[in-house]
Image: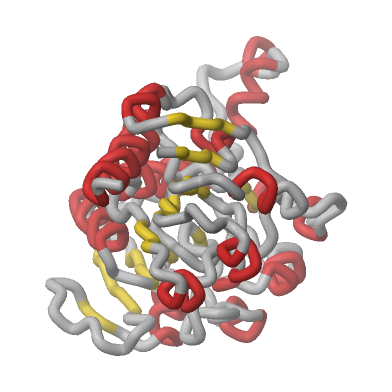
Amino acid sequence: MNIVLLDALTFGETNLNAFDNLGDVKVYKTTSPQQVQERITDADVIVTNKVVITDAHMKDALSLKLICVAATGMNNIDLASAKNRNIKVKNVAGYSTASVIQHTFSMLFYLLGSSRYYDEYVKNEDYSKSPIFTNVSKSFFEIKNKKWGIIGLGNIGQGVASIASAFGAEVLYYSTSGKNNSQPYKRVELDALLKTCDIISIHAPLNEQTNNLLDYEQLLICKDGAVVLNLGRGGIVNEDAIVKIIDERNISFALDVLSKEPMSKNHKLLSVKNKENLYITPHIAWASIEARATLIASIVQNIEEENL
């Protein structure tokens, strides 16, 4: 069995030796669109995270039997064509839940506690020159007794809600599908959530209901001092709207996802004036050591179950 890993660089230093027990393995760190066809021509199994596999690719890959997506979302695969060509497509779900939940709070605390400011304050020796033992020039609020709004109350959203509740926050949620009613938390409409919540975290998929869900008009009604965390998909929050409102209002944003990844050069977000109110990480919430190890183990299991 010939197995081809197309973008192994996304796994970092994760051990990939388990694939060697399944057949002949070729590992490519990255694969450009122009390189895909040549690399999968003789493959029985493709493993891809973000590399796009089209109908044309499948048409000329005569040995291809299985496409393993190293993620939950499968929008990079032409699923209809795969079905028509009897090529199975398998993804991995749930592997990164704990990792994303943890990063949600990591991003919140970084902004909430002005971590960058205080770290630099000490390291540039301003603290050493201080006449007092502390520095309270950057205020922060407690999560206790605040309202935390969650957009998308799936497994990740529920995990965030549980921890937010443990901190003493009142959790509200907005159902992006309009169908989620069986929760111990209060369901509200989007405008009500935005107007009343001190912290808003997004854990929803990108689809017709969520695309551009938070535009300038929606962000404009957020509370003064609110913190908005997007750990869903970049297209859910309009980035142009963030660029505008972050310099107009006292609203902070933490983004682990962007509409285009990697971030485009000279992106407008890099030019905002209130940089202390913006924290961006390069789509890493999913990628704890444990999550990546679980991902690889699950892909291997997906291949083994097919008995190719």
x and y, in percent, of residue 56 in the image: 65, 68
* Residue 274 seen in this snapshot: no
x and y, in percent, of residue 178 in the image: 31, 89
Q: Is residue 64 left or right of residue 300?
A: right
Residue at the right extreme, as displayed: 266
Task: Determine whether 30 is above or below 59 in the image.
Answer: above
Task: Determine whether 278 is above or below 147 in the image.
Answer: above
Q: Quadrant of the N terminus?
A: top left
Which of the 4 image quadrants contains residue 215? bottom right
Which of the 4 image quadrants contains residue 159? bottom left
Which of the 4 image quadrants contains residue 175? bottom left
Task: Determine whether 18 is above or below 198 in the image.
Answer: above
Tag count: 0
Q: Is residue 58 left or right of residue 23?
A: right
Task: Determine whether 261 is above or below 27 in the image.
Answer: below
Residue at the front extreme, as displayed: 62
x and y, in percent, of residue 100 in the image: 38, 48
Identify the residue at image location x=25%, y=82%: 187
x and y, in percent, of residue 254 in the image: 56, 53
Identify the residue at image location x=56%, y=63%: 58
The one of 5 and 132 positioned closer to us in this rendering: 5
Q: Is residue 8 left or right of residue 194?
A: right
Identify the residue at image location x=61%, y=34%: 28
Q: How is the image coloured?
A: secondary structure
* Residue 68 seen in this snapshot: yes
The one of 71 and 160 positioned closer to us in this rendering: 71
Identify the residue at image location x=86%, y=52%: 266
